[in-house]
Amino acid sequence: MNLAIAVLFILVTWRWGDWRNWQKYNASILFVVMGNFLYYFLYSGQLLWEVKPDFHWNYKFAELIHSFVTFPLTTIVFLTNFPEQFNKKLLRILLYVGMYVSLEFIFLQFGKIHYHRGWTFWMSIAWDCMMFPVIALHYKKPSISYLISLIVLVIMITAFPVL
C-alpha cells in the first residue's frame, strides 16, 4: 500500500506538479522531510503513529518511502500554482487535508497505520489541518513557519512527552 501511494504521487506530480522546477520548492521539501525525521528521532521506540510496511519490510523502509517520495511530491504539487486569494488558498489547503485524511482513513481500515500513546485519528486530522498551512507559509515566509513549528514541537512534547 505504501508503494502504491508513492506511485500514485509520482503520477500525480508528473501530471499536475511543477516537477521540472522542483528547485523552487526544495527548501519547503526539506522542511517537510526534516519535520518527519525529527518526529522519528524524538519518538523512536515510542511512536505516536506507525505506518505498517508493505510485504515483510520493516516500518523504517515504509517511512523512507514517505519521506523521500510521498512527502516531497505532495509538497511540489501542493505548492505548484499556489493561489494568492485567501478563499482559494483555503480551498487548496482543505483539498490536501481531505486527501491526507482520506488516505489515512484507508490505511486505518486496512491496518496499515497504528496509533500509540493516546494518539488518535482525530489528532491526525488536526495535525493535517496545521501541517498544510505551515507548509504554505514556509514557502513564502520560512522564518515564521520555523517559529510556529517550534511552538508545535513544544506542544507535542508537552502533550506526548519524549520518554
Image (spheres, rainbow, N blue to C red):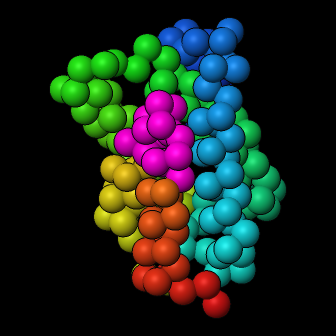
Q: Residue 131: x percent and y percent?
A: 44, 49
Q: Residue 126: x percent and y percent?
A: 33, 59
Q: Residue at x 73, y 39 (%)?
A: 68
Q: Quadrant of residue 18?
A: top right
Q: Quadrant of residue 21?
A: top right
Q: Residue at x 49, y 17 (%)?
A: 80
Q: Is residue 125 above or below residue 158?
A: above
Q: Which residues are magenta?
A: 133-146
- The single residue placed furthest to the front in the displayed view is 143
Where, quadrant-wise, is the N terminus in this rendering?
Answer: top right
Q: Residue at x 32, y 40 (%)?
A: 98
Where, quadrant-wise, is the C terminus in this rendering?
Answer: bottom right
Asked whether 105 or 73 is in front, the reply is 73
Q: Is residue 124 left or right of residue 27?
A: left
- Is residue 4 something that shows in the picture? no
Q: Is residue 159 above or below residue 25?
A: below
